[in-house]
Image: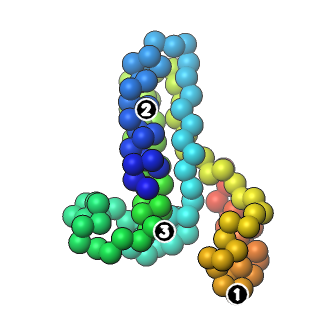
Amino acid sequence: NLAYNYLGHCFLILKLIDLLKKSKGFRIINVSEISHTLNLSDDSTINFDDFLYTKDSYSSKKAYKRSKMYLSAFTIALSYEIRIKNLRGKVVSVHPGYIRSNIGQYQFSFLMKVCIILFLPIFYFGITKS
């Protein structure tokens, strides 16, 4: 998760940044996720002592959430750098939205599916207000 949800994006952006600086204006759009903001547990904190899960047991869900959180943090830091260097560019991190699919049909219990259907619009519309 860390490699393809975070490191690959950052590596590509950092390789292209000199070329982007020469352009008249650029946009970098990172597709992230809001799942790390919906849970205030240990899943959504950066553990610098165990960045690669050598001490803690590995969880794909936790790794995914953390990788998306790292990408959002990178986007914020890059946006700040672009602003203080007065570059003609914009960096944003976006959530792709929700679609109805069968992707979680075996992952969630019936009660969890009902809760997602009922409460997801509240989280979605509450978070997307600007």
Seen as rendered, the residue at the extreme bottom is: 111
Q: Residue at x 66, y 50 (%)?
A: 96
Give the answer, above or below, for where 66 lies relative to 75: below
Amino acid type at mark 3 = Lys
Evaluate if marks 3 and 1 touch, with contact meaning CB atoms under 8 Å apart.
no
Residue position for label 2: 12
Q: Nearer the viewer, residue 4 or 114?
A: 4
Q: Position of residue 58 (x, y in %)?
A: 36, 71
| Residue 69 appears in the picture as rendered | no
Secondary structure, mark 1, is: helix
Position of the N terminus by quadrant? bottom left
The amino acid on which the numbered mark 1 sits, given as a three-letter code, is: Leu
The amino acid on which the numbered mark 2 sits, given as a three-letter code, is: Leu
Describe residue 96's horizontal placement relative to residue 14 as left or right.
right
Which of the labelled discs sits on residue 61, or is there none? 3
Q: Residue at 51% x, 13% y: name it.
A: 23
Work out whether residue 87 can be spotted.
yes
Looking at the image, which is closer to me, 122 or 99?
Answer: 99
2 and 3 marks in contact (CB < 8 Å): no
43 vs 63, nearest the viewer? 63
Q: Tag 3 or tag 2, which sits nearer the N-term?
A: 2
Q: Where residue 111 sits in the image (x, y, percent)?
A: 70, 87
Q: Which residue is mark 1?
A: 111
